[in-house]
């Protein structure tokens, strides 16, 4: 797989490993991280990094902000904890002996790996609180939904990602990595990564210009001319809300205010509130 494709962001936001958020190429370790997330969700009914938006999910992943329910067994907790190691090489199954070390973990005690494909899978327990028809009557299995687990399906060509919730008009296409489009990497400093990015219109008195608005972890807030690929402005960062704040007038329109200037933007994907929350979250880190 070419390096540019190995850094392409696809899949479900809550299952993305931290190394991908730091623009590292895909490895087998990525799948082991996803396995840890899957085991967590199978045992708890929700993902380990669940939150209200993709951007917040990414922040939890980067910080490895994970809590284990009390009902998790010691073996389950240990395996998931190891699979969600921030170092891909330390995850069970990533070593020189392949998946053998993963299969030997106490969590899988009693599993007949040689004949596992011929065994009858256990039935999925129904949700006791569900009011919908049972699987036996309507022929469909119970499939709970979870806030913050939206699927990311494709690159939007502007450094963002499209979510399955986009059709409902909710805030989507949030980016937390700088590998969506290599065009924007040239504007990052060594060790710097993108926290949020989107194509917006910079509104002026008479005209408007398309720019790429980029928030980084430095923190730094810049906007780039997407056609000429040059930085058009660097908004002076401050953790003090008196010196830097965001005012939202509609789902699509917001202003970034500093003591010297007020910049008006229009986001056609209705991410005005998300930009406000992203900036304020970074100020309060």
Image (cartoon, rainbow, N blue to C red):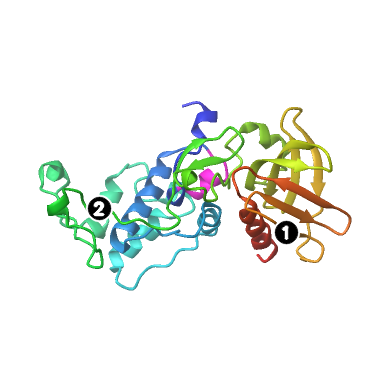
Q: Nearer the viewer, residue 185 or 3?
A: 185
Report whether 190 appears left or right of 232. Answer: left
Quarter holding residue 281: bottom right
Indicate the secondary structure of the residue bearing disc 2.
loop
Q: Position of residue 22 (x, y in %)?
A: 57, 45
Residue underneath mark 1: 247
Quarter holding residue 173: top right
Front of the two marks 1 and 2: 1
Indicate the secondary structure of the residue bearing disc 1.
strand
Name the residue at 38% across, 48% down.
34
Q: Which of 63 and 199 is in front in this view?
A: 199
Label 1 crowding class (10 Å Cα cut-off): few <14, some 14-19, many 20+?
Answer: some
Q: Residue 104, labelled with which disc?
A: 2
The magenta-colored residue range is 16-24
Q: Residue 136, labelled with which disc?
A: none
The mark nearer the N terminus, 1 or 2, is 2
Instruction: Examine the rendered structure and indicate whether residue 177 appears above or below residue 61.
Output: above
Name the residue at 81% across, 46% down.
234
Outermost residue, front side: 206
The answer to the question of whether label 1 and label 2 lie on touching residues, with beta carbons closer than 8 A, is no
Name the residue at 75% across, 45% down.
222
């Amino acid at each position: 797989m070419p390096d540019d494709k190995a850094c392409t962001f696809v899949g479900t936001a809550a299952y993305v490993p931290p190394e991908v958020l730091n623009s590292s190429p895909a490895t087998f370790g990525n799948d082991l991280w996803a396995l840890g997330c899957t085991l967590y969700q199978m045992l708890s009914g929700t993902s380990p990094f669940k939150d209200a938006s993709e951007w917040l999910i990414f922040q939890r992943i980067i910080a490895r902000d994970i809590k284990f329910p009390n009902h998790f067994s010691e073996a389950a907790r240990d395996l998931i904890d190891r699979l969600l190691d921030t170092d891909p090489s330390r995850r069970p199954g990533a070593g020189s002996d392949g998946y053998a070390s993963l299969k030997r973990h106490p969590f899988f005690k009693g599993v007949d790996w040689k004949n596992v494909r011929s065994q009858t899978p256990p039935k999925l327990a129904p949700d006791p609180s569900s009011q919908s028809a049972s699987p036996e009557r309507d022929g469909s299995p119970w499939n709970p939904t979870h806030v913050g687990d939206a699927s990311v399906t494709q690159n939007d060509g502007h450094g963002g990602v499209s979510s399955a919730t986009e059709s409902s008009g909710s805030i989507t296409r949030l980016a937390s990595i700088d590998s969506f489009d290599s065009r924007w990497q040239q504007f990052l400093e060594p060790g710097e990564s993108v926290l949020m990015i989107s194509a917006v219109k910079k509104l002026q008195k008479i005209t408007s210009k398309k720019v790429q608005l980029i928030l980084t972890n430095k923190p730094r807030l810049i906007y780039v001319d997407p056609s000429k690929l040059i930085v058009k402005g660097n908004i002076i960062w401050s953790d003090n809300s008196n010196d830097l704040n965001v005012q939202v007038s509609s789902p699509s329109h917001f202003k970034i205010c500093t003591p010297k200037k007020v910049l008006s933007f229009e986001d056609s994907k209705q991410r005005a509130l998300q930009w406000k929350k992203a900036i304020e979250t970074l100020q309060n880190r």
